[in-house]
Image (cartoon, rainbow, N blue to C red):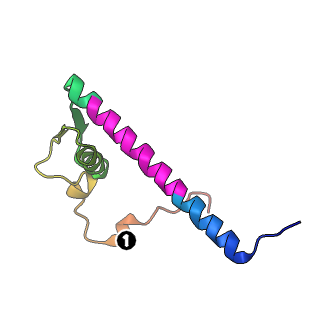
Amino acid sequence: MDSFSLKQGLVLLAVAVTMARWVKERKEAHLKRRIQDGVKAKGYSVGIIGAGAGGVITAKKCMDLGIPFHIYEMAHDFGGTWLYNTCTSWAWFSPPPLPFM
């Protein structure tokens, strides 16, 4: 029975990793193309409610995919909870003690 050497094993591993990356990139490109084609064909745009962390991340993803979007925010600026949080001490962020301790 013939056994693999360490060098042969590392070469096979490198080939497998390269193939996995290539397949992942092709799938992502295909999905991106399908999303863009569907959005453009139907004239959709995405409405993002709130410009907090989640809204900003969603807007970034839409920009990456080329999807038109609108952000609806009731405040004058983005930031969500962090926009309104005006505490001066980081101690405020510590969790309260549990009642049974």
Picture coordinates of residue 84, whole percent (x, y): 21, 55
Q: Nearer the viewer, residue 38 or 16?
A: 16
Picture coordinates of residue 52, whole percent (x, y): 26, 50
Q: Is residue 95 magenta?
A: no
Principal secondary structure, stretch drawn in magenta: helix
Image quadrant containing the N terminus: bottom right
Picture coordinates of residue 64, whole percent (x, y): 27, 48
Relative side of 1 to 50, left or right: right
Q: Nearer the viewer, residue 50 or 10?
A: 10
- Residue depicted at 49% across the width and 49% down the height: 23
Residue found at the very far front of the displayed protein: 2
Q: Which residues are magenta?
A: 19-37
For disc 1, the neighbor class at 10 Å (few under 14, some 14 to 19, many from 20) is few
Please state which amino acid type lies under the numbered disc 1: Ala
Task: Identify residue for label 1.
Answer: 91
- Residue depicted at 28% across the width and 44% down the height: 65
Picture coordinates of residue 34, whole percent (x, y): 34, 34
Q: Nearer the viewer, residue 5 or 33?
A: 5
Q: Secondary structure at mark 1?
A: helix
User: Which of the 4 quarters of the picture holds residue 3?
Assistant: bottom right
Q: Is residue 34 magenta?
A: yes
- Residue depicted at 27% across the width and 53% down the height: 81
Residue found at the very far top of the displayed protein: 42
